[in-house]
Image (cartoon, grey):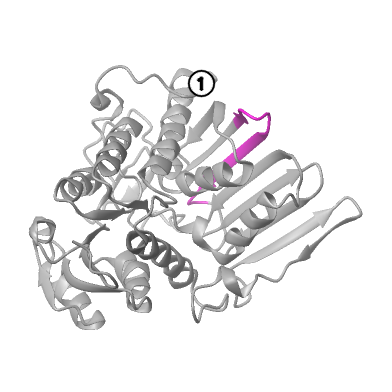
């Protein structure tokens, strides 16, 4: 279905993230073209189509899934719609890029992974920060032995994006049972850090224990414009043990003061240490620092040009810079015809399994072992409140 040189893309969702990251990424890559965009708010789809010179704008995302002139479906819609749309696209024989989470239950994501692999289709999850140039170089250094044996990983995504309770949170259910703390920051902010931990340490987590808190009890509801009780996880911490003996801590919150996105990944090993910071500060969006036993003061490293997309610079927005690498990776994988597929639904399933395990640890107040049990229907793990 894919032409030899051009991947034809249909984008589902025309919100701020689609327009700020996804669509600029496609426009930057000459090997693809966006042929249609869909959004239930048709005016939003039309505005995006005009801005990015997209020929077709429709309201029904399924219309794009059914089209024969589309090779890749990009799911950038509200989280609760991800799995159904991604599954439909795979059934229609299309490659899929899906924002996180693919599904709230890791077993559903595994099902989608298996379907894609059976049909020899490429998938990718929007785990944006693994594609930052600094993070790419960090991974190269770790793989090359710079830190030696990994001992400890510390990961953070912390910012004050929703510290103000009158700034309405996206994708919350005002009808949820407010007597039960609902997962929020752990899923939205924890996912990319868990992914980075997996990449950098090079091992699977075998045990986790974690806790979550609700610090801002009342918030504005976008749909009603009124304040109400919102018992959501807006701050969380968990500890993990890797199968290779390394340790990790992960901390996320969207009510801790600091600039967006507030990503920091630290890894310490037997021969060295690296700190990757992905925060827009002083006119740059990323830094990578290193230390060794004979030079314990961390020094900034220069990121090689090969880690950047064409024309990329750390002085541009992290959204366009990191996502350009993500889009380039996926388009290259689709056109290659081989099995290469980093950050696919398999990686997404692993990340979601850790999230599900940390939630279970919090609910049951205990350490939880990984992998989780595969028995039973996937829907048992999906909270009705979501």
Query: Can you see residue 158?
Result: yes
Q: State the image quarter where residue 378 is shown.
A: top left
Is 287 on the left or on the right of 363, as rendered? right
Q: Where is residue 313 in the image (x, y as percent from the top left)?
A: 55, 78
Outermost residue on the right side: it is: 294
- What x and y, as percent, mark residue 235? 50, 42
Q: In this view, does 75 lie above or below 28?
A: above
246 in magenta:
yes
SS for tag 1? strand
Residue placed most toward the observer, 236 or 336: 336
Residue 250 place in picture, x, y as percent? 58, 41
Quadrant occupied by the C terminus: top left
Looking at this view, is 337 or 375 the one in front? 337
- Does the stretch in magenta take in 59? no
Q: Position of residue 151 (x, y in %)?
A: 73, 37
Image vertical order of residue 52 relative to residue 68, above or below: below
Q: Residue sitting at 46 percent across and 24 percent down?
A: 371
Question: Which of these two is toward me, 159 or 249?
Answer: 249
- The structure residue drawn at horizontal position 43% and vertical position 53%, both measured from the top left corner, is 127
**Which residue is located at x 38 percent, y 32 percent?**
181
Dominant SS type (magenta): strand
Q: In this view, does 304 lie above or below 254?
A: below
Position of 175 relative to 46 (above/below): above
Reading the image, the residue beneath label 1 is: 368
Residue at 60% x, 40% y is 202
Q: Which image quadrant: the N terminus?
A: bottom left
Q: State the extent of the magenta-drawn residues as a range.
A: 240-255
| In-image side of 292 versus 225 (left or right) | right
Q: Can residue 160 be seen in this view?
A: no
Give the number of marks: 1
Position of residue 67 in the picture relative to residue 74 (left or right): left
Q: Answer with the quarter of the image where residue 301 lies.
A: bottom right
């Amino acid at each position: 279905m894919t032409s030899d040189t051009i991947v034809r893309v249909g984008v589902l969702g025309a919100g701020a993230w689609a327009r700020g990251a996804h669509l600029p990424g496609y426009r930057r890559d000459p090997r693809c073209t966006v042929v249609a965009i869909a959004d239930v708010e048709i005016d939003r789809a039309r505005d995006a189509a005009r801005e990015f010179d997209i020929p077709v704008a429709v309201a029904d995302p399924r219309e794009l899934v059914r089209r024969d002139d589309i090779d890749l479906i990009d799911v950038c819609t509200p989280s609760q719609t991800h799995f159904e749309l991604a599954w439909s696209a795979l059934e229609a024989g299309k490659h899929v890029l899906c924002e996180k989470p693919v599904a709230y239950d890791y077993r559903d994501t595994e099902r989608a992974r298996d379907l894609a692999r059976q049909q020899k289709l490429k998938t990718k999850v929007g785990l944006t920060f693994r594609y930052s140039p600094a993070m790419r170089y960090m991974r190269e250094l770790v793989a090359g032995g710079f830190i030696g044996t990994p001992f400890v990983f510390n990961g953070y995504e912390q910012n004050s994006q929703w510290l103000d309770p009158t700034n309405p949170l996206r994708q919350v259910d005002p009808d949820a049972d407010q007597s039960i703390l609902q997962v929020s920051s752990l899923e939205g902010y924890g996912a990319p850090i868990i992914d980075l931990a997996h990449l950098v340490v090079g091992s699977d987590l075998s045990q986790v224990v974690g806790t979550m808190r609700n610090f801002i009890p009342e918030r504005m509801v976008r749909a009603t414009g009124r304040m109400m009780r919102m018992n959501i996880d807006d701050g969380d911490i968990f500890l993990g043990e890797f199968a290779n003996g390394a340790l990790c801590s992960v901390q996320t919150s969207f009510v801790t003061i600091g600039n967006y996105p507030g990503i920091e990944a630290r890894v310490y090993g037997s021969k060295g240490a690296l700190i990757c910071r992905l925060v827009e500060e002083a006119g740059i969006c990323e830094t990578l620092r290193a230390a060794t036993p004979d030079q314990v003061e961390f020094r900034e490293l220069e990121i090689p040009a090969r880690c950047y997309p064409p024309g990329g610079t750390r002085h541009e927005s992290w959204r366009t810079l990191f996502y350009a690498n993500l889009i380039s990776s996926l388009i290259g994988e689709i056109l290659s015809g081989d099995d290469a597929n980093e950050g696919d639904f398999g990686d997404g399933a692993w990340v979601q399994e850790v999230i599900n395990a940390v939630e279970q640890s919090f609910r049951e107040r205990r350490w939880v072992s990984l992998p989780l049990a595969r028995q039973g229907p996937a829907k048992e793990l999906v909270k009705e409140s979501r």
